[in-house]
Image (cartoon, grey):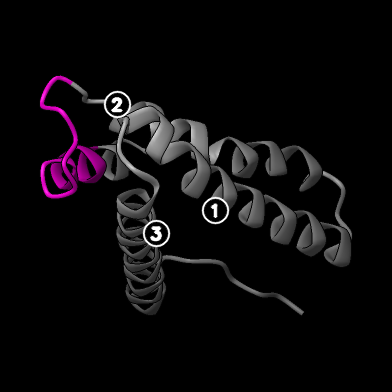
């Protein structure tokens, strides 16, 4: 949340946000709230329930990002769309990086062991 919030603040000047408006971390936390709430449903160990909740949570988070960014940053909606798309791209790149780090860490022997 902190890193994406800092990216939002970093990109703010490019999209015409006032210099006093540094609400990146607030927006990142607001947007990620459905994903945090999905963790409550993950206690119930049924795969299709967790997948359905995950899809709904990701969809709601993306919706909150696209709708909330122009309001919180006080910019026009057309700039808000491009700004939100760039933030979503940064988030997806961070996800791929996290997957790559997980693969590297697991390949050196630190990871789950499956015992049959």
Marking on residue 62: 1
**Spatial separation of the CA atoms under disc 1 and disc 3:** 8 Å
Image point (48%, 49%), residue name: 66
Q: Are marks 2 and 1 in contact (CB under 8 Å)?
A: no
* Badge 3: residue crowd in 10 Å (few <14, some 14–19, many ≥20): some
Task: Say which residue label 2 marks.
Answer: 23
In the drawing, does residue 7 fall left or right of residue 94? left
Numbered range of the magenta stretch: 6-20
Q: Are marks 1 and 3 in contact (CB under 8 Å)?
A: yes
N-terminal label among 1 and 3: 1
- Quarter of the image with the N terminus is top left
**Spatial separation of the CA atoms under disc 2 and disc 1:** 17 Å
Residue 113 or residue 81, whichever sits in front? 81
Image point (41%, 70%), residue name: 99
Q: Is residue 93 magenta?
A: no
**Spatial separation of the CA atoms under disc 3 and disc 2:** 16 Å
Q: Quadrant location of residue 82?
A: bottom left
Disc 2, SS? loop
Residue 92 or residue 75, whichever sits in front? 75
N-terminal label among 3 and 2: 2
In the drawing, does residue 22 fall left or right of residue 110? left
Image point (29%, 26%), residue name: 23
Marking on residue 86: none
* Badge 1: residue crowd in 10 Å (few <14, some 14–19, many ≥20): some
Marking on residue 88: 3
Image point (35%, 48%), residue name: 80
């Amino acid at each position: 949340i902190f890193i994406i919030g800092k990216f939002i603040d970093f990109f703010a000047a490019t999209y015409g946000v006032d210099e006093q408006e540094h609400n990146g971390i607030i927006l990142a936390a607001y947007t990620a709230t459905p994903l945090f709430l999905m963790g409550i449903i993950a206690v119930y160990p049924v795969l299709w329930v967790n997948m359905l909740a995950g899809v709904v949570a990701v969809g709601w988070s993306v919706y909150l990002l696209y709708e909330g960014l122009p309001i919180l940053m006080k910019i026009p909606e057309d700039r808000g769309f491009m700004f939100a798309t760039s933030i979503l791209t940064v988030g997806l790149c961070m996800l791929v990086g996290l997957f790559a780090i997980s693969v590297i860490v697991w390949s050196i022997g630190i990871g789950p062991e499956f015992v049959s």
